[in-house]
Amino acid sequence: MRLQKAIVLAAILSMLAALAAPTASAATPYEAYTYNFYEESVPLPAPYVPEQAVTGQSLGVGSFNQPNDLFITEDGFIYILDSGNARIIALDRQWRVLRTIDHFELDGAENKFANPSGIFVSEEKEIYVADTDKGRVVILTNEGELIRIVDNPQSEILPPDFKFVPLKVTADKAGRIFVVARGMYEGIMQFDETGQFMGYVGTIKVTANPADRLWRALATDAQQAQMQLFIPTEFASVDIDRKGFVYATTIDINSTETIKRLNPSGQDVLKRFGEYSPRGDIRYRMLGNNSGPSKLVDIKVLGGGMYVALDSLRARLFTYNDEGELLYAFGGRGTQLGVFNTPVAVERVADRLVVLDRGKNNIVVFQPTRFGELVTAATTEHYNGNTDQSVGIWREVLRLNSNFDIAYRGIGRSLLMQKKNKEAMAYFKLGMDRKYYSTAFKRYRREVMQEQFGNAMTTLMVLLFAFVAYRIARKVRVRRSERREA
């Protein structure tokens, strides 16, 4: 009887504990993963769990209609581009509506947006809107008053029949404006602070694959004339970090460099030191629904050397570190909270991720789990050069997931900087990092040689002295033998 009561009591306590502390996987309708050295997807604890969904009804402004973009400032103010309703909804940090901007005054008359596609807000709270169907970038004050309009760019490098169709927009601290425009294969359009067109940045170089080249070489002149030209791919999204580097994505099924980080000269300086370049999924089906490479439609710089890209094809989020290594991916399609229909934009507010879903006409807010917090903290500490602090955090990460290769690599790199080469080798081996393992091995070999140099030289000198003494003694014996014979 007592045993039965004890069993029942234990069962009740277990159920209460499970209810009090649900696991991350139980709260998410998706699986999180990364890729290992062998191109295999490795399950991970969920880095984020859905917290809430925000709709136009919950905000009290009426239903969203095909919203296209979202921007959140560093101090937490939220701007929603409700494209189908041709309006901007500005919110404070608590998601309370501050104002709705659906028109502005131009030349004494009321002027409205037409299918706007992109929005950016500067540190001074100036609002930049890519007003797509009207072929212009509208710059407003935070209250919605017109500052200036950028339209009809003029330049000798633009074709005579050029039509300006802006899709996405961002600006740096100097006031330079970067615009992703439809049909602009030359790169991202750059304007100065007065709205004058300056040229392109980040020109995409496209080359044909070997099969295409062979086919063109064998084709007749008539066949070649009918073939599709190898033209560059358009950019899809753009963001800018605190240092003024422009992050951008392209949708190109033939490229492995669909994420770029452009310096002020327009050169791509994104680090790609991982086993695979940052491009979303590296393994996928070639046929059927959701087949093919990821289509990265948006990108957000998170800080600490991290950035996240949004894949609209399979509705997933991919977060990378400064080295270009995939930290984790999560998401998917569905009707539940936390999965999407047509995700179009990703933003960050404090430690939360925010995703705008045009298909569901809502915004999903994700909060980090313990695993997500630790990975962010360790990555940030390592990026800031605080290697000692990052080691302890990476060890905590491994307690939650012992198959997380990046944690082993992070510890190994920290130990390498502390000149603990032998220990670093062990962690690089666990993390399947051949490059850094070779570096640690070379340093360890040099270290061993330096430590043993004194002993080796002493042994060599003793052997040399013994050899010389032996030769002298031998010569003495030979001479004595010769004298006796004489």
Image: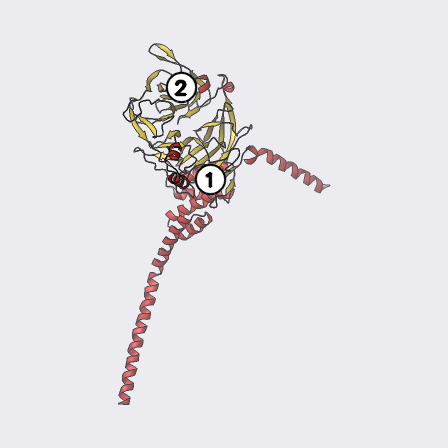
Q: Residue furthest top?
A: 108
Left or right: 43 with respect to 160? right
Q: Disc 1 residue type?
A: Ile
Q: Quadrant of residue 120?
A: top left
Q: Which mark is residue 95?
A: none
> Would you call the spot at circle 1 few (<14 residues within 10 Å), some (14-19), or many (20 or more)?
some
User: In this view of the protein, which residue sits in the foreground, 442 or 221?
Assistant: 221
Q: CA distance from mark 1 to mark 2?
A: 35 Å
Instruction: Tell me the residue at 65%/39% (across/down).
Output: 10
Q: Which residue is mark 2?
A: 133
Q: Residue furthest bottom?
A: 486
User: In this view of the protein, which residue sits in the foreground, 336 or 262?
Assistant: 262
Q: Which residue is mark 1?
A: 282
Left or right: 3 with respect to 440? right
As helix, strand or loop, the secondary structure at mark 2 comes to: helix
414 over 197 or under it: above or below: below
Q: Quadrant of residue 183?
A: top left
132 over 379 or under it: above or below: above
Quarter of the image with the C terminus is bottom left
Count of all numbered marks drawn on residues in the image: 2
The percent coordinates of residue 416 (x first, y second) are 38, 48
The percent coordinates of residue 454 (x first, y second) are 33, 62
